[in-house]
Amino acid sequence: MTEPMPNSWLDRVLFHRAPGIYVAPQELPVDQVAAEVRARDWLCFSASLGGVDTKTRLLETVGDALGAFADWGGNWDALVDVLRDLPEASGYVLLLDRCGDPAGGCPADWATLISILADHIEETTEDQPPLRVVLRDGDPRSGYCPA
């Protein structure tokens, strides 16, 4: 296996910016982001949200990506618990691809997911591993577009 090529955008997000929600450049492949995150000893959780247009599918897909147990509950409160119970790591990246699909198909639920992720990031203390959420989709429906 070859060593991933260093990426200055990802380095800035992981090491020089506060935990938060970021939009990856479209030209940055999902598998490259995941490999680079793992090479830095962080855990990378990734999900394609293509075709996700209901709350149930959104919770299922994100819960699966985060490694939730089969009987984790599948609701917003349970997702908060899943985020609190992530395995030990130096840091976490939740990489979500094709975000325009749930943003357009179930916009209120997409907004709730983003709010839960933002609250989790904000509530993380300095002695806890940081979370970066990376959206790899420039679809304006996601509410986030590359700068």
Image (cartoon, rainbow, N blue to C red):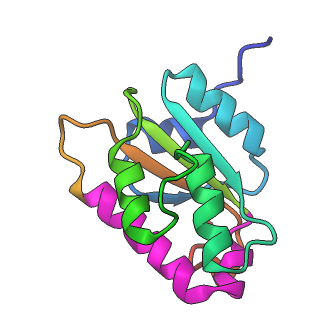
Camera sees residue 133: yes
Residue ranking furthest to the top:
1
User: Is 105 covered by the magenta stretch?
Assistant: yes
- Residue 137 in the image: state x and y as whole percent: 71, 65
Magenta stretch containing residue 116, yes or no?
Answer: yes
Where residue 4 appears, as percent x and y from the top left, is 71, 22
* Residue under the point 52% across and 64% down: 74
Q: On the rendered image, what quadrant is the C terminus found in?
A: bottom right
Q: Nearer the viewer, residue 83 or 133?
A: 83
Determine whether 24 is above or below 10 in the image: below
Quadrant location of the N terminus in the rendered image: top right
Residue 18 makes an appearance in the image = no
Left or right of 25 on screen, residue 39: left
Q: Which quarter of the figure has residue 5?
A: top right
Across and down, in percent, residue 22 comes to 52, 58
Magenta-drawn segment:
98-122
As rendered, which of 126 and 138 lies closer to the eye?
126
Is 115 situated above or below 64? below
Residue 38: which quarter of the image?
Answer: top right
Question: Left of 86 or right of it: where is 99?
Answer: right
